C-alpha cells in the first residue's frame, strides 16, 4: 500500500484546529492544488458528509477528487475517503494536544490495488508532496484566529 504522512504543530487549541480542518471550504487556503470545494451531500462537517472538490490535474486541467467524511471525533480525529478521481485515497487528520498547541498528523494511503501505486514510482512522491502541504496549516490557522 502506498502511503505518506506528515505532522506539524499549530499554536492553537485542538477544537480550533479540528473545526478548521472539518470545514472543507478551508482546503484551498492551505492546499495549493485545490481550486474549489462545495458540500454535495449530508450535513457539513458530519460523518457521511460529501464534498465536491475540483483540483489541478495534469497539464493544468481540472480533476474531480470528491471525498466523504468517514469518521469524526471532535478535537481528535477526522478520517475521509476519496470517492471520485484518479485515485481513491483514504486519509485522516490526527490531533493531539501539547503544551505549545495542537500537533496535527496528516496521513494519506492508496489501496494496494490502485493502478498508480504499481505503475508510477512518482506516485509515492505525489503523496509525500500532498501531505507536506500541511506545513502551510499553522500559518493559515494562526493568522485566521488572530484576526477574528
Image (cartoon, rainbow, N blue to C red):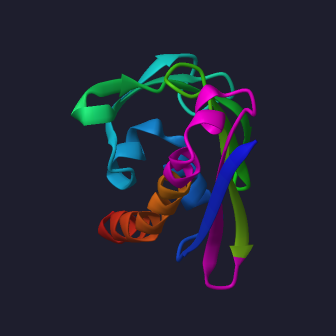
The segment highlighted magenta reads: 98-127
Q: Could you tell whether 53 is left or right of 66 in the image?
A: left
| Quadrant of res 15 | bottom right
Image quarter where the C terminus lies is bottom left
Which x, y percent locates residue 134?
49, 61
Q: Residue furthest left?
A: 60
For the point 68% across and 49% down, which residue is it? Answer: 3
For the point 58% across and 33% down, which residue is it? Answer: 116
| Quadrant of res 136 | bottom left
Q: Is residue 106 visible?
A: no
Which x, y percent locates residue 82?
59, 28
| Observer-nearest of 86 and 140 | 86
> In this picture, is 106 found above or below 54?
below
Which x, y percent locates residue 73?
75, 45
| Observer-nearest of 76 and 108 | 108
For the point 68% across and 85% down, which residue is it? Answer: 99
| Quadrant of res 17 | bottom right
Is 115 included in the stretch rendered in magenta? yes
| Observer-nearest of 80 and 41 | 80
> In this picture, is 83 found above or below 34?
above
Amino acid at each position: 500500500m502506498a502511503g505518506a504522512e506528515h505532522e506539524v504543530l499549530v499554536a492553537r487549541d485542538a477544537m480550533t484546529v479540528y473545526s478548521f480542518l472539518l470545514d472543507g471550504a478551508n482546503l484551498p487556503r492551505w492546499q495549493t492544488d485545490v481550486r474549489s470545494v462545495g458540500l454535495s451531500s449530508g450535513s457539513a462537517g458530519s460523518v457521511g458528509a460529501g464534498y465536491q472538490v475540483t483540483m489541478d490535474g495534469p497539464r493544468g486541467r481540472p480533476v474531480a477528487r470528491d471525498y466523504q467524511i468517514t469518521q469524526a471525533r471532535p478535537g481528535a480525529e477526522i478520517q475521509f475517503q476519496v470517492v471520485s478521481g484518479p485515485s481513491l485515497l483514504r486519509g485522516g487528520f490526527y490531533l493531539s494536544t501539547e503544551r505549545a498547541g495542537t500537533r496535527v498528523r496528516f496521513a494519506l494511503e492508496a489501496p494496494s490495488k490502485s493502478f498508480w501505486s504499481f505503475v508510477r514510482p512518482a506516485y509515492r512522491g505525489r503523496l509525500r508532496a500532498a501531505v507536506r502541504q500541511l506545513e502551510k496549516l499553522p500559518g493559515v490557522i494562526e493568522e485566521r484566529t488572530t484576526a477574528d
